[in-house]
Amino acid sequence: RCCIYAALLGAALSLGTSGANAFTCAHELGHSRSPRERALADVLLAAQGLPYWRAAHAAHHKNVGLPGDPETALLGEGFWEFLPRALQAA
């Protein structure tokens, strides 16, 4: 039984790490001017269940730090105030 839990923990850590790396690559590719690289970003994001993210992130860049930006906490906004707004945008 202990071996099963260790294997599951190892799989979770491995998948989480590879997913984080894929997300970072997709984020950078999404900023590219090349349509092929942006398409690759879309594929990577879709594989992670985040097909909407590149469009949402573009809106973030247009409104960074403004009330219309769900990805940035407002000045003086605490974590627990920001969290529902961020989750609602996702």
Image: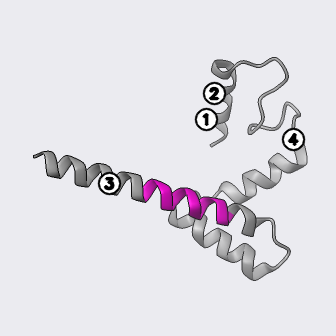
Question: Where does the C terminus fall, quadrant-wise?
Answer: top right
Q: Amino acid at mark 1?
A: Leu
Helix, strand or loop at label 2? It is helix
Is disc 2 in contact with disc 4, using a CB cutoff of under 8 Å?
A: no
Q: Which residues are magenta?
A: 15-26
- The Cα–Cα distance between marks 3 and 1, rounded to whole angstroms, is 28 Å
The mark total stands at 4
Q: Residue 42: x and y, percent?
A: 65, 69
- The Cα–Cα distance between marks 4 and 1, rounded to whole angstroms, is 17 Å
- The Cα–Cα distance between marks 3 and 4, rounded to whole angstroms, is 37 Å
Is disc 1 in contact with disc 2, using a CB cutoff of under 8 Å?
A: yes
Helix, strand or loop at label 3? It is helix
Mark 3 lies on residue: 10
Which of disc 3 and disc 2 is earlier in sequence?
3
Which of disc 4 and disc 3 is earlier in sequence?
3
Frontmost of labels 3 and 4 is 3
Residue 85 visible? The answer is yes
Q: Residue at x 73, y 77 (%)?
A: 37
Along the viewing direction, whichever of 79 and 16 lies nearer the viewer = 16
Mark 4 lies on residue: 64
